[in-house]
Image (cartoon, rainbow, N blue to C red):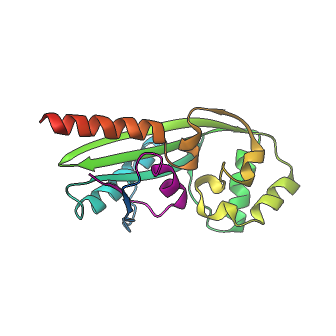
Amino acid sequence: MRLILASASPRRQELIALISQDVICAPSGVDEVIPKDIKALDIPLCLAHQKAEAVAKSYPHDIVIGCDTGVILGEEILGKPKDREDAKRMIKALSGKVHQVVTGCALFYEGKTVGFSNVTEVEFFELSDDEIESYINTSEPYDKAGGYGIQGKASLFVKAIKGDYFNVVGLPVSQLNREINCLVAENSKG
């Protein structure tokens, strides 16, 4: 049984290798549709489900894993910055505050679907304008939710973290591994 990762994220590809070496990466290419009136905390799981469902059609006998990570500040979900000004706005908004990073994971296997969300709280130090400018002048913020990568230069901004570090990177590997094992065990029973 192979794992099919419905993602092109190099960070997720590295992390899923901790669970299994038998992994195929098959990005979904779906147009992400966020339903109206959905809570910010529920958006990542909703999008993960859309990605996994699209890829599962091509891999009906493998475990397909869809993931989506969102950075939530208050009621606002911060996606990937559109441009330099958007990245600046996001990092400035996160400065000196606690925010939540939510990764939704959806698993499809032999007609069964399992989904979960992992939430980690991250607190940033108060950042100077120079720190923000220096950071947004790197290439790092532009392909990451919330405009930062905790595993890179933005690690210097982190005052505290409560929860799963790997969730902030983009894949809560310990919880995902347990969910995969439960799904396989349930499937072998029936």
Q: Is residue 43 magenta?
A: no
Residue placed most toward the observer, 85 or 169? 169
Q: Compared with residue 67, is residue 125 higher up or lower down, i.e. above or below?
A: above
Image x and y of residue 144, in percent: 60, 58
Does the stretch in magenta take in 17?
A: yes
Q: Read off the magenta span.
A: 1-20
Percent across and percent down for residue 165 are 59, 39
| Residue 82 shown left or right of residue 114 in the figure | right
Asked where in the image residue 178 lies, by quadrant, the reply is top left
Instruction: Name the residue: 68% across, 54% down.
Output: 90
Find the residue positioned furthest to the top.
162
Q: Which image quarter is the C terminus in?
A: top left
Residue found at the very far left of the displayed protein: 190
Q: Is residue 19 above or below residue 147?
A: above
Front one among 19 and 117: 19
Look at the picture and state if 112 lies above or below 87: above
